Amino acid sequence: MKLKRFLSLVALLAVAGVVYSIHSQMAPKPLRSFVATTIMSSPQKGSPSLSTSTLAKAVRTDGSWVEIWTRNIGGQDKHERDIHDFKNGMVIVVEDATQSVVRNSIPPGEYKHRLVPAVSCDGSPAGQILGVEVNYAETTQDITGNEQGDAIELEKSWAVPDLGCFVLQKETIWTRKSDGVLLVDTKITPISMSFQKVDEFFEIPTSYTERTKEEVLSRLNKLTQQGLPRESSRVRESPENPD
């Protein structure tokens, strides 16, 4: 091999190596399945104590996710799972208190909430939470038409770049424009996180009954009349953001 040809080959390989290195650094990491458990807290009107609830989120490698809410009803823990199955295009609510299953198609506009691998997230690096690197970001927006008066919303979030920008910690504050009164101060604080298989969270009990949202709400009203708190259920009309 002539020297000139050899040097050209070496240069070509060097360039290819640099390009591969840059591509490797820019390519997002595949999603890993995980479960994150958080505490949601907010002030209660007329009470010095906070209203709290436990929320777990299980995320599948295809970006589908489940919210698992826990409430104590009549001395027993009851769960509601809101399954956002983007692979099959369905949001399925599994409600323990009434042993019900509610199915709806995911609206096209909600697919933006599917978790996908990401190279980076909004905001700037802010260290670690529960052993994972997070980015901190703040956003503000005007809230109009609120019955308590127009307000400014400040949202603080801590997202995990390696997990599709999953929001692990969040704080939402509404401040009334007219007098600066705090209207909303909701915090979502993570308490545990584990990387594990999550298939069990997507399973639907065969013994539960398929019902409409209205039928479930009617049954919940009956439970309320029996002295059980209606807030034990979070049956919703449409899927929400996992953030």
Image (cartoon, grey):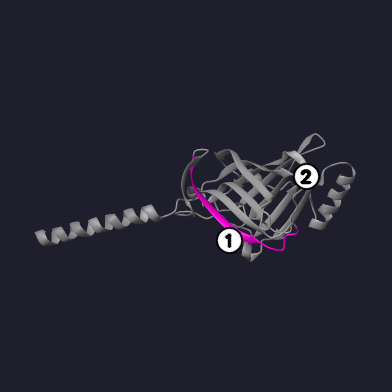
From the viewer's perspective, is 96 left or right of 106? right
Disc 1: which residue: 112
x, y percentage for residue 46? 78, 43
Q: Earlier in the sequence, mark 2 or mark 1?
A: 1
**Residue 140: which quarter of the image?**
bottom right
- Residues 183 and 161: in front is 183
From the viewer's perspective, is 210 left or right of 109? right
Q: Gap in Å between the C-alphas at discs 2 and 1?
A: 28 Å
* Kind of residue sitting beneath label 1: Lys
In this orientation, does residue 2 appear?
no
| Whether residue 105 is situated above or below residue 235 in the rendered picture | below
Which SS does the magenta portion mostly show? strand
* Kind of residue sitting beneath label 2: Ser
x, y percentage for residue 60? 57, 49
Part of the protein shown in magenta: 132-147
As helix, strand or loop, the secondary structure at mark 1 comes to helix
As helix, strand or loop, the secondary structure at mark 2 comes to helix
Disc 2: which residue: 232
